[in-house]
Amino acid sequence: MKNNYKRLFQKAIKNPGDALNFIVNLPKLIKLHFRLFKDARTPLNAKIVLVLSLIYIVSPIDLVPDLLVPIIGYADDIIILVAASRYFLKACPPQLVTEHIEQIKSESKKA
């Protein structure tokens, strides 16, 4: 199950047409991250990396300034967010990720 989300990342990067699939599933991916973050069984180091990446994104300090180089300036934020997200999902125990994915699926079927 975890590999499905990993494949979505990779497909969106390789083929912009698949980016639509990624965008459609983005709310579920965000929900998965939020649920895993709240779960006490998630390793602390994974939580720290995710928090630090979010702090970097909202921080006015950037490796490539957003205002000086608009498109490339935002690229470093996206790269860091994707890398942190991938690390976060890899650092979580697979059975924990699967458990939360199944819960998200069952919630979406009820709605």
Image (cartoon, grey):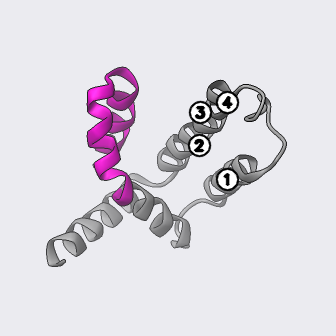
Specify the amino acid type for callout 2: Leu
Mark number for residue 79? 3
Q: Is residue 48 left or right of residue 78?
A: right
**Do the residues under discs 3 and 2 have CB atoms within 8 angstroms?**
yes
Is residue 67 visible to the viewer in this orientation of the structure? yes
| Tag 1 residue | 54
Seen at 53% across and 39% down, the residue is 82
Q: Is residue 68 left or right of residue 30?
A: right
> Would residue 21 be counted in the magenta stretch?
yes
Specify the amino acid type for callout 4: Pro
| Residue 110 screen position, x and y as percent | 16, 78
Q: Secondary structure at mark 3?
A: helix
| Tag 2 residue | 81
| Tag 4 residue | 70
> Would residue 88 be counted in the magenta stretch?
no
Q: Secondary structure at mark 2?
A: helix
**Do the residues under discs 3 and 1 have CB atoms within 8 angstroms?**
no
On screen, residue 40 above or below 102: below
